Image (spheres, rainbow, N blue to C red):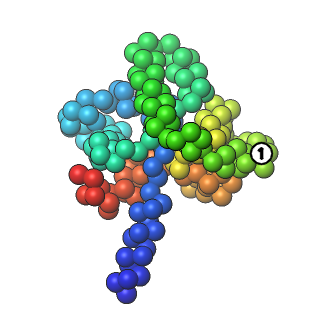
Amino acid sequence: MLKMREKNNIEVFESLPRRIFLDSCTLQNIQTYGENIFDNIEVPINDKNARNVEALRNIFFVNQRANFEFALSDNSIKEVLDKGDKSYLQWAFDVLDHWMCCIEEYEKGEAFSRKGEMLLKQLNSKQFGYLSEKDKALIFDAVLLECDTFLTMDLKLCTPKNSEHIWKMLKIRILQPYEYWEILKPFARLWV
């Protein structure tokens, strides 16, 4: 029984999302709640984002040593530009710079296996008619960038029906920060 549990724990650990695409709303909330996330300042309990902000604090604390990759794309930057907020744009470029540094650390050609490209070639985008064009573009970017997870605070994307369909078709998890933290939490002590 113990060996079976150890094997299951190893499989779960190996399947932890390590390359995470940040949806624009999550990126903006990380900027908005930066002092709560990075400086450990409490979020008021009645704040509608409290659970996700607390999860982001925990995720980024673990990431100080875990070195997960947080990805953005050209479409991410376009969405940020549409907001017209210079500080948000600077924040997005800082995160994009982190992402580019992660990719540069790979040996030549090892950052991408092209499996995301192959997945998208098989799809008809009409299968995702329930997504807005912007959401579809970002999710497709996340698949092309071979991300394990699309981290969002957009409740429309996180419905079980949408999440299950996207997982079935694109092999990418759609998770809110608190859901990702629940997956990561049992292993957090490995890094902190």
The amino acid type found where label 1 is placed reads Lys
Left or right of 159 in this view: 66? left
Residue 55 appears in view: no
Relative image position of residue 94 (x, y in whole percent): 41, 24
Using residue 74 as the reference point, say whether residue 175 is left or right of it. left
Q: Farthest residue toward the bottom?
A: 1
Would residue 167 be visible to someone looking at this image?
Answer: yes
Measured along the vertical axis of the image, is residue 92 above or below residue 44? above
Which of 66/85 is in front?
66
- Residue depicted at 25% across the width and 29% down the height: 35
Secondary-structure class at tag 1: helix
Q: Is residue 160 above or below residue 79?
A: below
**Which residue appears farthest toward the front when viewing the image?**
108
Q: In which quadrant is the N terminus drawn?
A: bottom left
To which quarter of the image does residue 56 belong?
A: top left
The percent position of residue 32, horizontal first and vertical second, equals: 35, 26
Residue 117's quadrant in the figure? top right
Residue 72, image x, y percentages: 52, 32
Tell me which residue sits at (67%, 50%) in the image.
115
Using residue 58 as the reference point, say whether residue 113 is left or right of it: right
Q: State whether residue 79 is above or below residue 102.
A: above
Which is nearer the eye, 48 or 35?
35
Q: Is residue 96 above or below residue 87?
A: below
How many numbered marks are there? 1
The residue under label 1 is 121
| Residue at image point 37% right, 56% down | 184
